[in-house]
Amino acid sequence: MPHVPPPNSAIAELVSALGEESARELAEMFLTSFEAVFRDLHSRDHSERKRAAHSLKSSARIVGASDLSGRMAELEARLTNTTGDVTPEDIAATRADFEQIAVPLRAYARQAG
């Protein structure tokens, strides 16, 4: 199996700072933790939805998922206003943004070291 290079500049920076193995581990952590945090966007608790948006914003930024990070920043700002909420469109777009970045991250993170 050929070596898969870092899929974006954020991962390349992680490789420079932490090494290849640690960068792959961070990418894998993002991939495996996404579903649990994504479910929290559906929580009945407003503060839990806001925490989930904040968490996804930060972790997505670290692994170079800029579309997802930007979407979560907008959602977090909306949830900061107590009348703002998560819409079905937000959920669908969040899933689509994740699936777009997940493919190259999986290829990178799951290669043999």
Image: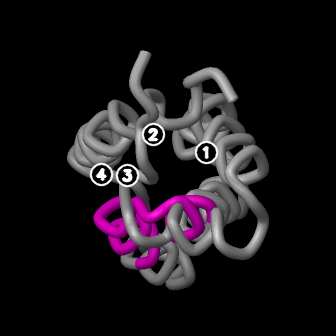
Q: Crowding at label 3, few (<14), some or many (≥20) Cα neighbours within 10 Å?
A: some
- Image mark for residue 7: 3
Judge whether 58 appears above or below 111 on screen. Answer: below
- Image mark for residue 90: 4
Farthest residue to the front: give it.
2
| Foreground residue among 19 and 10 | 19
Q: Amino acid at mark 4?
A: Asp
- Image mark for residue 105: 2
Q: Which residue does the image show at 63% across and 21% down from the upper left?
A: 112
The location of residue 31, given as percent across then percent down, is 58, 35
Q: Amino acid at mark 2?
A: Leu
Between the C-alphas of marks 4 and 3, the distance is 25 Å
Between the C-alphas of marks 2 and 1, the distance is 6 Å
Is the image coloured rainbow, by chain, by secondary structure, or in one colour? one colour
Quadrant of the frame with the N terminus: top left
Q: Earlier in the sequence, mark 4 or mark 1?
A: 1
Q: Earlier in the sequence, mark 1 or mark 3?
A: 3
Residue range (magenta):
59-73
Q: Which residue does the image show at 40% across and 25% down from the upper left?
A: 2
The location of residue 34, given as percent across then percent down, is 59, 37
Between the C-alphas of marks 2 and 3, the distance is 7 Å
Q: Amino acid at mark 1?
A: Ala
Quadrant of the frame with the C terminus: top right
Between the C-alphas of marks 1 and 3, the distance is 10 Å
The location of residue 17, given as percent across then percent down, is 73, 75
- The quadrant in which residue 59 appears is bottom right
- Image mark for residue 27: 1
Q: Contact, CB < 8 Å: mark 2 with mark 3?
A: yes
Q: Crowding at label 1, few (<14), some or many (≥20) Cα neighbours within 10 Å?
A: many
